[in-house]
Amino acid sequence: MADTPQTQVWTIRKILDWSKSYFESNGIDSPLLDAQLLLGHVLNMTKMQLLLDGERPLDAEELAAYKKLVIRRARNREPIAYILGKQGFWSLTLNVSPDVLIPRPDTECLVEKTIEFARARIQGRTPSWPLVGDNLTYESVDERKSYYEAIEAKEEIEKQAGKMQEQNEGSLAEIPSDEGEKEEPGQIGSQHPCIHIVDVGTGSGAIILALASELSESESKLTAIDISPQALDVARMNAQECGFKDRIEFLESNLLSKFDGMADIIVSNPPYISSSEMTQISPEVQKEPVLALEAGADGLDVYRKLVPQAVSKLKKMGALIVEIGYTQANAVEALFKACGLTQVRTFRDYGRQPRVVFGLLER
């Protein structure tokens, strides 16, 4: 904007066209979308309103405010979520700051799996997770079906799942009850009207708040844990704004070291980037808290601590469910099994990458 005559009339359409080119020249991956988000923030307009009102001119104050945001995005490579202070996740809009990891769509897969197991646990049954391929599960979806239609035809999933189910009668359907007696197929023991879910490394609170939005107060007791007091402040603010503050207990703790209860489900999206990978991540990701990203030479340091702790804090027939890096499935599955978890399996994310590992404590 500085290299253009001051008499130039900057309409919404012109400024978006200019911003798109400027962002492209600075290596921004989504130049038009970022420009629309920033301009919409300044003008308090939706993307649709920007398109419909493209000839509306910007005044000097609006131009100055917008230019500041453009510089933060292009020159400083500050993430859009930090500039706006907001990020959408699940059905929620969350506050975010440089004190917390920015919630990402792939983590919604972790939420989905947790909800499915939680509802099954409440009802005393097993989740309906058909096996596909190399022990990678790929669920048939109900209300979130649209995510998968763009990846793989549902008919092919069901066809493969049917073949595998015929060969796996001894899988989850054979889990014994709490009393040691074999239940009917599809049962995991007695019903649990209210289950305790613990989110380790809650950050912005994205996971635990998404769970609170899907599971009623009568169904779930919720605990959110983080080592960072600043992150917990953000999570509490989000819980307040989402209407769930009174439902969630917040605990400052290094993993589960200060958690003295027992849980039905422990869920976590821990740090899992290796030290060498940290040198190769994008400038935007480098702006996020290292504490929430880096996990040692192979990215597995936190799992090595968390998994045995979780096993000691899980009730019988409880589950540990974690997000992983897409190359870590075999290593994390091995950790689960070495610590006594069974029915260990990995789920793919929306991009078909291994993303979530599940394990059950049967003993």
Image (cartoon, rainbow, N blue to C red):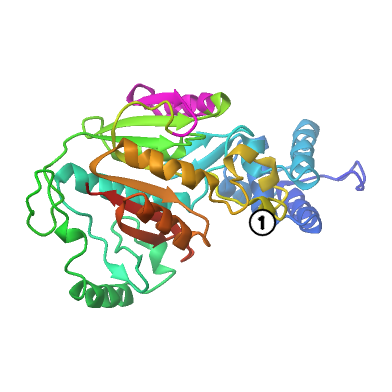
Report how many numbered discs are placed on residues in the image. Answer: 1
- Say left or right for 339 vs 2: left
Residue 31 falls in image quadrant? bottom right
Residue displayed at 76% across by 51% down: 19
* Residue 105 visible somewhere in the drawing: yes
Q: Nearer the viewer, residue 8 or 70?
A: 70
Q: Nearer the viewer, residue 174 or 326?
A: 174
Image spot of residue 164 (x, y percent):
25, 74
Q: Is residue 76 above or below residue 141?
A: above
- Say left or right for 37 vs 202: right
Residue stretch rendered in magenta on the structure: 232-255
Q: Is residue 296 above or below residue 252?
A: below
Image spot of residue 58 (x, y percent):
75, 39
Tag 1 secondary structure:
loop
Residue displayed at 69% across by 41% down: 287
238 within the magenta span: yes
Image spot of residue 181 (x, y percent):
6, 50
Q: Amino acid at mark 1?
A: Ser
Image spot of residue 325 (x, y percent):
52, 56
Residue displayed at 15% across by 45% down: 123
Residue displayed at 73% across by 55% down: 28
- Say left or right for 362 vs 288: left
Q: Would you name the residue on which mark 1 appears?
A: 30
314 within the magenta span: no
Q: Nearer the viewer, residue 69 or 335?
A: 335
Residue 167 falls in image quadrant? bottom left
Q: Nearer the viewer, residue 247 or 30?
A: 247
* Residue 210 visible somewhere in the drawing: no
Residue 314 falls in image quadrant? top left
